[in-house]
Amino acid sequence: MNPYRVIGKSVPKKESWDKVSGRVKYVDDNQEVGTLHVKLLTSHYAHAYIKKVDTEEARKVQGVHAIVTGKDYPLLIGTTIKDRPLLAFDKVRYYGEPIAMVIADTEAIAIQAVTLIHVNYELLPVVNSSLQAYQKGAPLVHERLEEYLIDQENETTGTSGGIRPIPGTNIANRQGIRKGNTDEGFAQSDFIVEEVFSFPQSDHTAIETRCSDVEIKKNGDVIIHSASQEPFEMRELISETFNIDQGKVHVHIPLVGGSFGAKTSVQLEPLAYVASKSVGGRRVRLRNSREEDIVTSAVHIGLHAKIKMGCTKDGKLQAVKFLFLFDGGAYAERAVPISKAAAFDCTGPYAIDNVWCDSLCMYTNHPYATDFRGFGRTEAAFGVERTMDILAHKVGLCPLEFRLINAIQPGDTSPTQVLLNRSNLGDIKECILKLKELIDWDQGQRIKISDRKVRAKGISCAWKNGDPPPGVGAGAVLTFTSEGGVLINSAAVEIGQGTKTVLTQMVAEKMRMSVHDVNIQMEVNTQLNPESWETAASRTTFLSGNAVLRAVADAVNQLKRTASVVLNVPAEELVVANKKVFKKTAPQISIDFSEIVYGYIFPDGTVAGTQVIGRGSYIIPGLTEMNPETGKGVQGPEWNVVAQAVEVEFDKRDNTFTLIRAITVADAGTVLNYKGAETQVMGAMNQGLSFATREGFIYDDEGKVLTTQFRSYKVMHYGEQPEYIVRFIENPVKGSPFGSRGLGEHGIMGMPAAVANSLSIAAKVPLNQLPLTPEFIWKTRLQRGGGSNASL
């Protein structure tokens, strides 16, 4: 039974009515007279030296105010390794890379001028996959990688634990996991499998494309309006890159029209700053077209994985070995921490004593990568969960029972050698058992429907630690209206996940008042909001929630102190509820918030208390840097576990299939907003199914992206989805607001693997490459002789 009044209830999002009525103003909706428009000239080649950029004809176009090229600002930027030019100035490293930009009166004029800029290239060999990048003698994407080193003595660069690019290679970073002895583990194994898997780069496909407005005031203040998940990180990067005092960089983030990680790293804002500076500080707007958003800005990372796994004849896993080659694209950016995070959770939610993993972030001549929902776990889980199915079938065990045998439990250790307990782990076995019931597993995994069609069920499990860097935190401030209502000041960015509504629920719960009396500002302003870490990694509710709860406690203490004087009752005997402070044993002795939130004045002029301003801040304790060789360390406060299943109907004649059911059972700790949690998970499931069945970039032999618009880049449409079933189990986390666990990424992580496992059963062939299109299944069955006798 839910012990809470507001927590757990399906409270509508605070911004819902504005969104459905079209009143919400996103960055691109705010039009200011006099704003100039910026368009980018991007590369037609994936790898080439820039010999000359001729802008003479473009400058003649009426309405053009300025043209900026890479030679004007030969800067290197980046949030991990500073390896990315603001505008390419010596060579281009991916198709779609910005080379120059035009600032003009209108976007149409800017586009016209861009077409008149001529670039002479000297073509270079293309590195077209992470596997090719790994090969000895492969062309180098960065020939002078050693120049990016900051700490020459330790050969490290970047942030959080040291990033180690390897000069003379395409390796931006190598993260190791060394736990136990894998040689001994494989020697003790009765069955061993070794498989290769691939997960292509893809797009985030947020409804709102990236957009940024920048204006430089006469006093030097830089005013930025942007669609971003990290306002304070943006402020810091702009300050550092252009030598501006942070206090003069004002970042405004309105409601963001979806992101899924796309808007984490700072991308368009430095370009927009330079564009504004080139026209005397006038306000400029740089917005991506859909095509630019797909290939010019950062993308969803790809992965080539080789996995070796061994177990005893009774199904107990003994050892596992991973080689992850992540396709980070042309620049390190967020691909490095993604590749590191995948290593930290490489085993999935299974107890394995002997683990060896090398997770490499590879430079390629593809668009560079940034965060995506799951942060490397979805890609890694695809390989792990396919291998689990393959090994289970080789041993002759039911795939679900095989997972139950090996499910990680309290008392086991993570790949990073952290001792696990019920709080920091949750219960994956309980998730699996509930999934078994919901998917009707005992009715059979492969059922014949007709001579032509079969139905098949596939399952998967996944886990994820938020792995924020040490020292991250959040702040919150509560103020009151004269009526006694509460206003929350928080820098959590609302990207559709519902965090800001959940924060109002927390306040309402703790203060025992209606959620309608608690409001929160949607826009983030770095000049006004207390600083908070970026909105990412399913950590926002954890960080901002803890800060808000501390602010509530502070405000309640102030209310009680003032009421104690007015009511002549000891503060410890007072409680708050319904916008009142009253004596617990005599509720009739009370005073309204409205009488004391600005202090109380007695008839004789004596004052009790002052304006009530609740302040709260929070930093995650106990986090450590992670050892780059062994992976040992504490990367986050808890793991979130999930079990998933997909049922498909497969046509053996034409290799088409229909998604029938998709099920997720997640350990939510404590559900904060039931409908919000359910729809969050469903949305993530939809993305996972889309990656499994259709999404992914297609490149030609020269590294050109061929899928640059929704005509060619396919996503799952409404009406194509299966029946979604979402259930939660609740094992609270110590130290988390109300015991909650992050839920934003649960739904996606195991979906691609569950689809692949179901279709592999249905088609009777191993399907280890995404996306799983009917054509790919057909080709795989042909290679396996039709699939009728093929093993899984």
Image: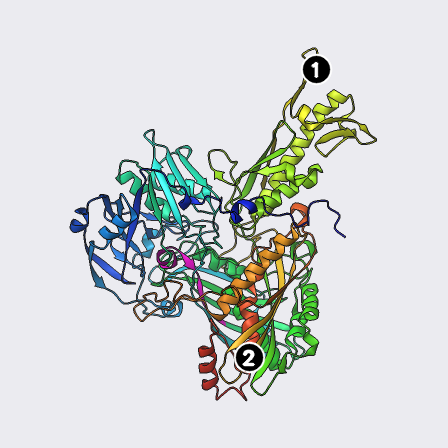
Instruction: Point out residue 591 in the picture as x, y percentages from the top left corner.
Output: 74, 26
Answer whether residue 561 is visible to the viewer in this image: yes
Above or below 774: residue 538: above
Instruction: Point out residue 327 in the picture as x, y percentages from the top left corner.
Output: 41, 64
Above or below 505: residue 94: below
Q: Residue at x 41, y 56 (%)?
A: 164
Out of 487 and 665, give the one closest to the viewer.
487
Labels 2 & 1 near each other (Cβ < 8 A): no
Q: Quadrant of the C terminus?
A: bottom right
The kind of secondary structure element at disc 1 is loop
Out of 417 and 469, give the one closest to the viewer.
469
Residue under label 1, please give it: 602
Task: Of the two numbered discs 2 and 1 on the same chain, state the one appearing first in sequence.
Answer: 1
Above or below 436: residue 287: above
Question: What amino acid does circle 2 point to?
Answer: Phe
Out of 173 and 477, give the one closest to the viewer.
477
Left or right position of 656 against 165:
right
Q: How many residues crowd around disc 2 within 10 Å: few (fewer than 14), some, or many (20 or more)?
A: many
Instruction: Point out residue 451 in the picture as x, y percentages from the top left corner.
Output: 58, 88
The kind of secondary structure element at disc 2 is strand
Q: Residue at x 55, y 84 (%)?
A: 791
Q: State the image quarter where residue 710 is shown.
A: bottom left
Q: Return the mark for residue 330.
A: none
Residue under label 2, please give it: 650
Work out which residue is located at the far top of the displayed protein and give it. 604
Q: Residue at x 44, y 52 (%)?
A: 208
Q: Which residues are magenta?
A: 291-306
